[in-house]
Image (cartoon, rainbow, N blue to C red):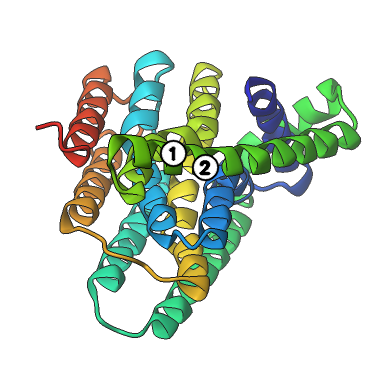
């Protein structure tokens, strides 16, 4: 996974240079979808095993882990400096999608209408990201893309086949890992007496968020700040717009507690406010500590340990 994360960073730079799109856009779409393969795999296997509760709980737990545990760790061990414009706009987009996700799951409208709304939302989001990146390469991203293009021409070390093989191998491994994860969760649920949805919110969410964790820490150490923000925001957008539509298309949403949804909403609001508060600045380590503490409280409360 560590090797794959390093390869992902190289892919980001090469694609950004070749396509002249900001690393933020590449991270928001391509890398976020790649690092979300564990969530997608768990979703597919859970639906196949008729356990939609686990699938939906994993998406909620993974989204909370992305903002709290992963961003908190990246802030503590690598440091994250925020941008001045696009990061904040994408945070607002994420907040809007999160609010919509919470409203839809709490509403009584038909599953068919929810599926339509989710797929419409992810389509609009991707189109917005594309046109925003296309506009940005002519203005605020031009200097960065020129530098990446020069670096790409001088230091290209691997052929495209290397990255294709790496990504295919990673995908195969993640598929097997997803099946093992679901079976392990079902076994633990039986042994510990927890519902699979509870473990999906905690243990499964942590395990499926490992690619984002490793990639974000490596990116923060390399000062690839746009990759950190883009991967986390993009991952949550897929978690809360694309994958729920897939779950509801082939299964049911199952019982969702207000605690889970409100926790997700509150931490997303905090994340959005934080991106505006420290606009253009380094995120203080105390924010990372607070985010990790929130995640620990969430896990302990979800497991009913207090």
Where in the figure is residue 44, as x and y percent of width and height?
57, 57
Q: Nearer the viewer, residue 49 or 40?
A: 49
Residue 237 lies in quadrant: bottom left
Secondary structure state at the residue bearing disc 2: helix
Label drawn at residue 183: 2
State the residue position of label 1.
Answer: 187
Tell me the crowding category of disc 1: few under 14, some 14 to 19, or many 20 or more residues within 10 angstroms, Cα based: few
From where the camera sits, is residue 124 visible?
no
- Residue 22 in percent (x, y) is at 61, 44
Q: 25 and 2: which one is in front?
A: 2
Could one spot residue 219 in this view of the protein?
A: yes
Is 204 drawn above or below residue 127 in the view shown?
above
Q: Is residue 203 left or right of residue 212?
A: left
SS assignment at label 1? helix
Residue at the location (79% across, 33% down)?
166
Q: Residue at x 63, y 25 (%)?
A: 1
């Amino acid at each position: 996974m560590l090797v794959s994360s390093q390869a992902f960073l190289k892919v980001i730079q090469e694609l950004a240079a070749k396509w002249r799109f900001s690393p933020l856009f590449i991270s928001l779409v391509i890398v976020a979808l790649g690092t979300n393969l564990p969530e997608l795999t768990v979703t597919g296997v859970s639906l196949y095993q008729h356990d939609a509760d686990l699938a939906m709980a994993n998406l909620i737990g993974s989204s909370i882990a992305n903002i709290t545990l992963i961003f908190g760790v990246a802030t503590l061990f690598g440091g994250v400096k925020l941008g001045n414009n696009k990061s904040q706009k994408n945070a607002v987009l994420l907040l809007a999608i999160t609010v919509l996700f919470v409203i839809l799951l709490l509403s009584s409208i038909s599953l068919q209408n929810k599926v339509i709304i989710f797929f419409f939302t992810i389509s609009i989001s991707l189109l917005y990201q594309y046109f925003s990146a296309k506009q940005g390469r002519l203005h605020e991203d031009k200097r960065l893309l020129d530098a990446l293009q020069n670096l790409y021409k001088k230091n290209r070390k691997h052929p495209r086949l290397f990255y294709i093989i790496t990504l295919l191998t990673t995908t195969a491994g993640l598929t097997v890992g997803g099946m093992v994860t679901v079976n392990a969760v079902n076994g633990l649920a039986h042994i510990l007496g927890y519902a699979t949805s509870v473990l999906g919110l905690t243990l499964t969410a942590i395990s499926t968020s490992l690619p984002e964790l490793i990639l974000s820490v490596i990116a923060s150490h390399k000062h690839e700040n746009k990759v950190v923000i883009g991967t986390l925001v993009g991952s949550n957008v897929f978690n809360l717009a694309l994958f729920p539509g897939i779950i509801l298309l082939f299964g049911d949403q199952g019982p969702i507690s207000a605690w889970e949804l409100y926790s997700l909403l509150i931490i997303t609001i905090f994340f959005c406010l934080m991106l505006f508060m420290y606009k253009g600045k380094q995120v203080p380590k105390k924010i990372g500590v607070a985010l990790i503490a929130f995640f620990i409280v969430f896990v302990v409360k979800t497991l009913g340990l207090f």
